[in-house]
Amino acid sequence: MKQKKTKIKIKRSKVNLYNKKKSKTRRTLSIVITIAAACILGVVGYGIGKPVMDYLNNRNLPISDSSDPWNSDNSDDSGNTGNSDDSQSSDNSSGSENTSGEQSSSDTQTSTPSVPVSSDTRMYVLPADAAVSSASLNSALAAAKESGCGVAVVTLKVNSGELLYKSDIPVVKDSEIIKGSLSAAQICGIITSAGLTPAARISTLMDSEYPKFAGGYMIVGGGAWLDDYPDHGGKRWLSPFDKAALDYIGKMCGELSEAGFKHIICADTMYPTFHKVDLTTHLSDLPLSSSSKRTEALRGVVTSAKTEAEKNGCSVWLEFSESGLLAEDKTGTDAEILLDMSGLSDVGLIAKYSVSAENAYQNAKDFAAALKSGASGADNTAVLIGAGISESARAEAQKAFTEAGVAVFRES
């Protein structure tokens, strides 16, 4: 029996299941989410895309070497040759730190002097203890800059034999001779950062400390020679006849010049006062009665200093007193070496001079003539004028020295 077909009526709905009408709240939320997503994609895309585009744009450019902070034509005048790391450490010693305890990036770039190094060759001698710390050195440099001189002279070995810097010379490196807290390179860095050219001053033979190790006068038969009885404060001296003394002075000048010093001033290159018994008995093995042998030994001291200093482009100056230059008999004075300067014509000579309040011009003119006469044809001659004189007297003396072709240096 056939089933009866039933007609089924299909109702069509007007609602699109894939496009349901959203509520007002959902539409607002959807817009916010869309905008946020666009922002995130924009930031991420820029962060990734920009480096990629920079690389693509710059990949054919030459690579620059930024490792050399002294990349300038005036690097030789900076007073610091190849020691940017050391001078940087000196500048950063007083630098500020960021909140995380790490050194800020600006502090790591202070090895280059903030002010161009002066081309003025006039010297200004800082106080004797200026190099003891960075604070005292910076304070002294302020006065040096005010003087107008372009070269700052810092004393690094005093006439007791103590060193006012951290030396790496093996014998003295860890000894009590070291009194300074800064290395030679750090001192150079501070001076060059102030816009000045660094110069060092050392006492050569007047030294009662190093002879405790080597290089001092020894009594015939044994024992250290002193310049007086021990209970009268007798002291040792370095002997220019002893190779150990010459080596020590040479190593020091090599160390200082390598650190960046452009000038080294050698002071106290002289003999102590000997008594007759010293010449005939205690030190009879030395030619102390021969003027030619004495000056030859003194020249050996300067030659040792000069040889090592010049390896690093550093010049050597010889300092002596006004009284030594004017003495009728220079034996035993710090000007005794002037009796024979054979082979040392390129060593500069500096005479300490006291300006007189009266007749400043004429007296200076007379002294300049004596200096020229005693300099034995030296290429460079200068006078070192101390403080505590009137500016008018200083000006008159400076005029006389300038006319005579003698440079004028200042002392603090």
Image (cartoon, rainbow, N blue to C red):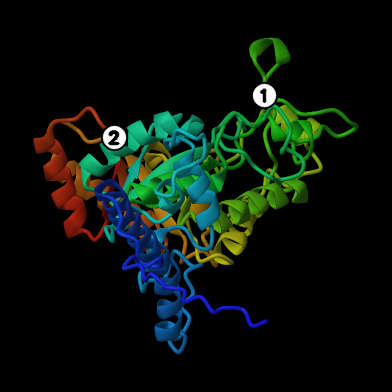
Q: Secondary structure at mark 2?
A: loop
Residue drawn 21% across and 40% down? 146
Q: Residue 349's x, y, as percent?
A: 41, 54
Q: Amino acid at mark 2?
A: Gly
Q: Is residue 172 above or below residue 7?
A: above
- In the rendered image, the residue lying farthest to the right is 221
Q: CA distance from mark 1 to mark 2?
A: 28 Å
Q: Quadrant of residue 179?
A: top right
Label placed on residue 235: 1
Label placed on residue 153: none
Residue drawn 57% across and 42% down? 183
Give the label, 1 or 2, closer to the camera. Answer: 2
Q: Residue 382's x, y, as percent?
A: 32, 52
In the rendered image, is residue 350 in sight? no
In the rendered image, is residue 244 in sight? yes
Is 15 or 331 nearer to us in this picture?
A: 15
Is 11 or 143 nearer to us in this picture?
A: 11
Q: Secondary structure at mark 1?
A: loop
Q: Quadrant of residue 393?
A: top left
Q: Residue 181's x, y, as percent?
A: 56, 32
- In the rendered image, the residue lying farthest to the bottom is 60
Q: Amino acid at mark 1?
A: Lys
- The 10 Å Cα crowd at callout 1, few under 14, some 14 to 19, many 20 or more, is some
- The 10 Å Cα crowd at callout 2, few under 14, some 14 to 19, many 20 or more, is some
Is 168 or 58 nearer to us in this picture?
A: 58
Tally of numbered discs: 2
Q: Is residue 228 above or below residue 241?
A: above
Q: Quadrant of the C terminus?
A: top left
- In the rendered image, the residue lying farthest to the top is 231
Q: Which residue is mark 2?
A: 386
